[in-house]
Amino acid sequence: MHNNIDEVVAKVADKFRRTVPEAAKSERVPYGSGAGKWIESPWKLGNSWWTAGFWPGMMWLLNALSPEDVFHAEAVRTTELMTREMRVFRHLNHDVGFMYMLSCGAKYKLEGDEQARWDALHAAALLMNRFNPTENQHNGFIRAWDGREQLGYAIIDCMMNIPLLYWATRETGDPRFARVARIHADTAAREFVREDGSCCHIVEFDPVSGEKVREHGGQGVAVGSSWSRGQAWALYGFTLLAMNTGEARDLATAEKIACYFARNIREDGLTNCDFRQPADVYRLDNIAGSCAACGFLELAKLTGKAEYREAAEKLLDGLIDHCCDFGGEYCGILTHCTAAYHDDNVGTHTNITYGDYFFVEALCKLKGVDPMLWR
């Protein structure tokens, strides 16, 4: 990298050291920031929104990068807020992995808290319970959402949630968690990943037969497009799968997706919101770039291939050079995060917390202090 990581880490720690105390005044974990203020999810679901776990996760990571009371206290406080949401249950879905691996799972891993362990296992049980078995036992999938009209919906994002199931099998000895993860991952590799390494976002299945009904464009441009954050979920998700299983087929899928992603990184190191968006459209998504950087760094360690680390460094240099706010406009860091290609109401070219989470995770990896909350 041409940027000095120690200098970047110091700037990141200083920024959050100044802005975390303001977030700590609220009972809602931040969704993002703007105009010098932390903001909550536009869906008004509070801490039940799927992104809520990234904030405590980032606090645990910041405490690894720069151990300080301000980060540790906020990690502990907001992990407890997440536990309360589990007891409410009302809005939980397949994203309990995002929510509880990075909060309760992190607290157990880093501090040995026994209640946090049980809460993480509770989340794993909720995720396993979303498994949709089908007439063809090899075509099962983890159902994404709860609506009656979405009974057969699965999404590529879930590849980032299934590491929670592998952890639960290792923790308890119960093979059912890992078995559900294995079937879902095989379905995803078969039905989501295209021959060129691109991925679709949403697949609708017949919940009885398990047959694929159709694809949906989801948060990308359209059906058949290539939403970059979906590509990042797949890249990092299948890399984590390979780390959990040690199977060559999982690593091959991760590399296939990674090669496609690397070919689509812009010359400036940034990522378009959709790799197949119109050429005259300027719409970036830094969340995709920061998440993919984490996946590339882990894939480089798994394979020993320098090109994956080079791709990660290109992405991180691009973010640092063009899209980091170390000043005061945002409370967070990354400036060009985009939640969905077609929906400006949920955040376009703004600061969104889970973009910052993956940026901080990548810095932890480069510094050699990553506690690897996904495992």
Image (spheres, rainbow, N blue to C red):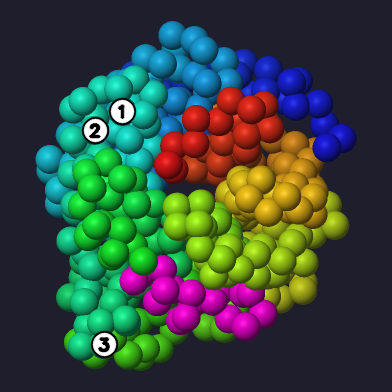
Q: Where, by quadrant of the figure, is residue 147 drawn?
A: bottom left
Residue 238 place in picture, x, y as percent: 52, 61
In the rendered image, residue 290, in percent from the top left (x then y), is placed at 62, 46
| Disc 1 residue type (three-letter) | Tyr
Q: Where residue 236 sits in the image (x, y, percent)?
A: 55, 55
Element on which disc 2 rests: helix
Mark 1 sits on what residue? 108
Q: Amino acid at mark 3?
A: Asn
Q: Give the Cα distance between marks 1 and 2.
A: 5 Å
Q: Residues within 10 Å of mark 1 (few under 14, many from 20)?
A: some
Compared with residue 25, is residue 41 higher up or lower down, i.e. above or below?
A: below
Kind of residue indicated by mark 2: Arg
Disc 1 versus disc 3: distance between alpha carbons?
37 Å
Q: Position of residue 231 (x, y in %)?
A: 58, 64
Q: Give the numbered dot on residue 75.
A: none
- Which quarter of the image is occupied by the C terminus? top left
Crowding at dot 2, Cα within 10 Å, few <14 / some 14-19 / many 20+, comes out as: many
Q: Earlier in the sequence, mark 3 or mark 2?
A: 2
**Mark seen at residue 117:** 2
For label 3, the crowd category at 10 Å Cα-Cα, with few meaning under 14, some 14 to 19 and many 20 or more, is few
Question: Which residue is nearer to you in this view: 56 or 279?
Answer: 56
Earlier-in-chain disc, 1 versus 3: 1
Disc 3 element: loop
Mark 3–mark 2 Cα distance, whole angstroms, equals 34 Å
Left or right placement of residue 117 versus residue 10 in this view: left
Task: Give the residues drawn in magenta, as a range.
Answer: 183-199
Q: Are marks 3 and 2 in contact (CB under 8 Å)?
A: no
The residue that appears at 60% across and 30% down in the rendered structure is: 364
Residue at the (52%, 12%) spot, across then down:
67
Residue tagged 3? 136
